[in-house]
Image: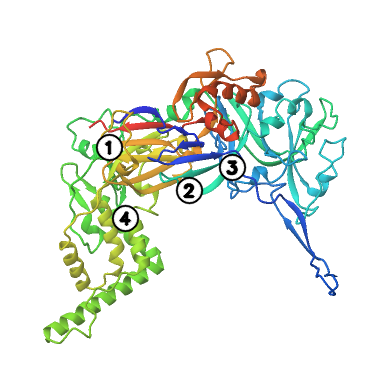
Amino acid sequence: MPSVNLRALRGSGLRVRGSLRTPSEDGTIEFLEFHQPALESGTYKVEIQQILEAAGKIPSHDFPKRRLIFAVLGERFGPLGPEDIVAMFPPPGSVGEHANVLPHITLSRSTLPWERLPGLVDENRSWMALLLFRASDFVDEGVEKPRVQTLTLGELIETSATTARFPKGVALEEGQQASDEVTVIDVQWKTLQHLLPTAAELALLAHAHQRKDGNEVPEGDLDATVVCNRLPEPNGTSTVHLVSLEKCYPNGVFHAQGAGPDEWIRLVSLASWTFDSVDPEQSFSELLKGLDRAPAELRAPLPEALPPASPAAPYLEQGYLPLPHRMRRGSKSVSFYRGPFAPGIGAEEVKLPAECADELVRYDPDTGMFDVSYAAAWELGRLRTLANTRVALELLRWTRESAQQRHAMRQRAARRLPLRQTRSEPVEMPEAVAEWLADLEHLVGLPFSYLVPDERLLPVEGLRFFCVDPAWVECLLDGARSVGRVTNADLEHARTVRASRSEGPQRVSGFLMRSSVVSGWPALVVEGYPERLPDPSVIPPATDALTPLRFDRLASDALLVLFAGEVKTLDVFQAPEAMHYGLDAQEAGGQEFTKNLRDPSGVSQPEAVVVPWRHADRQVVDIAGLAERMKAALAPVRAELPFTAAQFALQMIEGTERVRFVASS
């Protein structure tokens, strides 16, 4: 049974220029304070005038002015779509231990948080902010929940003060119609005033970042991230809204327009999501460690009433299950079946090619039962190919052309005729057929019931390792190829080709995971290694990892991964995009959080700063105060380096966790 070891993500070192090492060997993520667009959103007018001046008798001449008008259309009212959002953390709808996490949203357009202004002057503050609402915020009498509704832009612009306060300086721009719809959220001022970031915090809660490889070459796009200033509801539900603060800070302070405590403030909601924070037993690492249960292989537990000497025991240990079997003439029986996933490496040999599936049915006189595993695989391959009309026709045509070429070459050889007029190289397999067979080899598109015939093999919150039975896959492929075999000569040629193969099938192994980890953490990454690595501090370079052949989410909570080779060590962790921002350990029974610091070289410092609160009872962090404490604590090692949103993000980042499963033998 695999053992589990937990280790923080390696390479959390920082560089002076503001980089965080990614899980790759030498890669980095570089943080930038901001990424302003070349032009802000709005309408621009360009006037061009030519004046000709000459000395002497030639008079001056003014040519007519030429005017060019164009508009820069940036995001303004949303809602943001999937193409605009790279990641949200905690993931929408997830259930985990998020009590010390500052939620964030990562945007695909790196300039988006700075394309507009919260105030009236050119500055590096974001016009977006994340507001977190807890379910407990609205349990007191007189405190109403936010009202989320859809309006037209015309209704938004004309919002009456008796309904809600909305900035008066917002007007429609080019490309915006009064009939366009927008999502708004109305919040009572007595609730909102405690959650809004200050103008200084808007400059710290948004930054851009770029992933780079070991040679400092950018990989992927430059993204932007907006971070929240509040911790989620412990053991409860939290809802986060990305809101627009355009023109809401005209004088450096949020302008509530004289709203009373019970009056409403209207904000545009660009995106929103909900998640639950539960006890630590539901955290990423604890859920994964809970998967370490017997049996570790893909097989059902042996029945307690089964005698050890029963002839059926070896079948059950090898992953077989007795399943109903209907014979061709209508009689019913029970036969053994096992899919392609076996508990161990098998040495089964089957006689292929087969003319029909019945040739692959095996009978065990000790149990008096049939084994229909390979027969089912062969028939499945044939039926799947027949269902794909294009591939079936291409396969038949290719087989016919190959047979005709072989026949022509034999005729010329028998008659001792020259071969220069006859194509001697084999007819190339059609691309559609080659891709189809390659997918079948990796078990793509097969019904799940053929892979896992019974739910007992893969229970809820279960992790099962397996080796792919090469004989089962060979039978599947032979059944697929049988569509093109028509004559006895085709069958004999297939036997000749198979007998001439010098290498056997590729060894493949993998695992099936059925857990809320799959649905709760979509940015899941796995690495398999061919050696046993019981020491969690030993993390070999990614180049030593097994090549993944397939990484497929079969369902929202089910993951299938295949590796080329035999996996003996499995590491499960989160991708760099799943890195989050948060605080460190909370003292038992108290509200005090701390934040451990790193020096510019990435070395963790023994000092930690105490996190200040703007509202301790609501757990709203004093972001500006925390940044000042960090700056003062890091002054001896930072010299004259500025402390901006990039440096703040580097200090607040939390590395992803790595959980290791190691084969027992």
Q: Earlier in the sequence, mark 4 or mark 2?
A: 2
Q: Is residue 123 left or right of residue 557?
A: right
Q: Indicate which disc residue 568 carries.
A: 1
Horizontally, is 540 left or right of 636 in the view? left
Q: Is residue 85 above or below residue 360?
A: above
Q: In this figure, which residue is indicated by the disc labeled 4?
A: 441
- Give the Cα separation between the discs numbered 3 and 1: 38 Å
Mark 1 residue crowding within 10 angstroms, few (<14) / some (14–19) / many (20+): many
Mark 3 or mark 2: which comes first in sequence?
A: 2
Q: Amino acid at mark 4?
A: Glu
Residue that label 2 marks: 218
Tag 1 or tag 4, which sits nearer the N-term?
A: 4
Q: Mark 3 highlights which residue?
A: 224
The residue sitting at 80% across, 51% down in the picture is 172
Task: Give x and y (percent) for residue 23.
Answer: 41, 38
| Nearer to us in this view, 180 or 511 | 180
- Looking at numbered disc 1 in the image, what kind of residue is underneath it? Lys
User: Between tags 2 and 1, which lies in front?
Assistant: 2
Q: Earlier in the sequence, mark 3 or mark 4?
A: 3
State how the image is colored: rainbow
